[in-house]
Every structure is written in structure tokens, then in C-alpha cells.
Image (cartoon, helix red, strand yellow):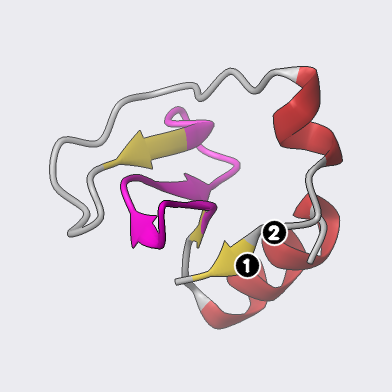
Amino acid sequence: MNIYEATRLAALTHMSITQRFDGQVVFKITPTNDAMLCAISNPDGSNPTRGWQPCLDDLLSEEWEVV
């Protein structure tokens, strides 16, 4: 799905979004409206870092999913 659809579903279900690389989830992004902005973390949620900065390919991708 595209990033809008994935983000909307993640917000409604209190989950995160990701893209798989070689079939693996290597990060997850948790969109928020608080000071964390879009926090990027390890697949298990550890090590959250504030302020994910996407590139154009990230924004245009149709391979987003909710995790």
C-alpha cells in the first residue's frame, strides 16, 4: 500500500509502518504528533530515534505495510 494508506491504518490501530528488505522487517516507523515526530526504531521497537527523514523513493513506494 502507499504511505498515506499505511500511515492512516497505523494511526487508527496504534501500530507502525515498514517496508521489507529481502523479506525482512529491518526498521519500523511510528508516526506521531508529539515531539518524536515520526520515530524510527528497530523491528522490536527498541532504540527509537526522533524524526525520520524520507527520500522521494520512500514517499512514492507502494510497498508500505502496517506492523
Residue occupying the point 49% across, 73% down: 14
- Describe residue 7's horizontal placement relative to residue 66 as left or right: right
What is the x, y in percent for residue 38?
A: 53, 36
- Vertical position of residue 24 compared to residue 67: above or below: above
Residue 11 is tagged as 1
* Badge count: 2
Q: Is residue 29 above or below residue 18?
A: above
Seen at 70% across and 33% down, the residue is 58
Measured Cα–Cα span from mark 1 to mark 2? 6 Å
- Front in this rendered view, residue 60 or 17: 60
Q: Position of residue 20 (x, y in %)?
A: 47, 55
Asked if residue 25 is among those painted magenta in the image, a careful observer would answer yes
Residue lying farthest bottom? 13
Circle 2 is placed at which residue position? 7
Residue at screen point 82% across, 66% down: 5
Identified at 80% across, 21% down, the residue is 56
Q: Is residue 27 left or right of residue 58?
A: left
Image: magenta residue range: 18-38
